Amino acid sequence: MRDGFLCRIKPRTKTGSAENPITKLFPAAITEQRFIEKLDNLLCQRSTVDYEDDRESGHTLIDFTLTEGKLRLPVNVKNAGTRFENAEQLVGLKPDDCIPIPVYKAYDAIEKEPNLLYVVAIDYTIVESINTHLIPLFDDNEAIVWRIINDYSGTRIRDAEDKFVYGMTSRHWDNLRDDFANPEFRPISAMKSIRILQKKPKRTPGIGLRAWGTGASAEVNVHISIAEETKPWSEICERISKNGLADIIDAINRKKTEVVYDPEI
């Protein structure tokens, strides 16, 4: 093989998030599979609600869209799989009470999809579970593809990664689901995430903290308190079941009057 196919593709430069694609790809696919189960349960509770799977549409903001009549509630599913151990020092939150939302994505969302709801699954065991339970299920051919995707790159590598990861998750899900934790899903809107950034800039190191690069790296995030600033998915599901999508859309767009500084100079 080395004299044929492999000599025609480039070795992957393994730096940063490319060091091990498993840490960013399989957790997302497995978390989304869990969330589909939550959506299917919601549909059983309210027959007028449906959902669209947008993951292959090329729309980077939306994974699923809940629908009811003309109402649409876009959802982005996220996995919080790494605890922010320096959270208390850097953003004033306990590590177990802290989830990140990328600032540039939230700003993009409120311009293009102002009703966007982030649904964050908190599961710090997921990568270990993938290594323990999923990878050993690969047959010989799947293992070869997995090694090539890990070790080589090319112009369509992202497409190949997505096809493989989602294909393997779907194929092996029945044998996998009991080996993975059933995480708690905590929703927060993009609107509220930006409101927290505006009111509490120290929650966004890089904006409100000097020398951010000495304390952490990667993209700029606003850090959210799980207990105080998100709600359990069970509450959102119950409200939709009783009152429909309009209740959640109205909650995302709630307004209040405030007296704020408006400097002329």
Image: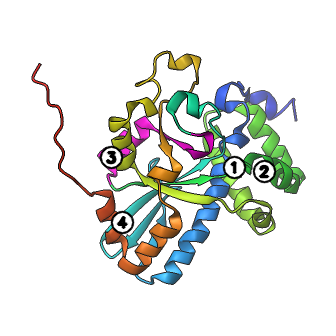
**Which amino acid lies under the numbered mark 3 shown in the image of this protein?**
Ile
Depth check, mark 4 against mark 1: the one in front is 4
Against 102, is 263 above or below? above
**Left/right of residue 122 with respect to residue 250 in the rendered view:** right
Judging by the rendered image, the residue that carries numbered circle 1 is 26
- Secondary structure category for the residue under label 4: helix
- Tell me the CA gap for discs 1 and 2: 8 Å
**Which amino acid lies under the numbered mark 2 shown in the image of this protein?**
Ile
At a point 64% along the width and 62% down the height, the residue shown is 33
Judging by the rendered image, the residue that carries numbered circle 2 is 130
| Residue stretch in magenta | 94-114
Judging by the rendered image, the residue that carries numbered circle 3 is 110
- Secondary structure category for the residue under label 2: helix
- Tell me the CA gap for discs 3 and 1: 27 Å
Against 52, is 56 above or below? above
- Tell me the CA gap for discs 4 and 1: 30 Å
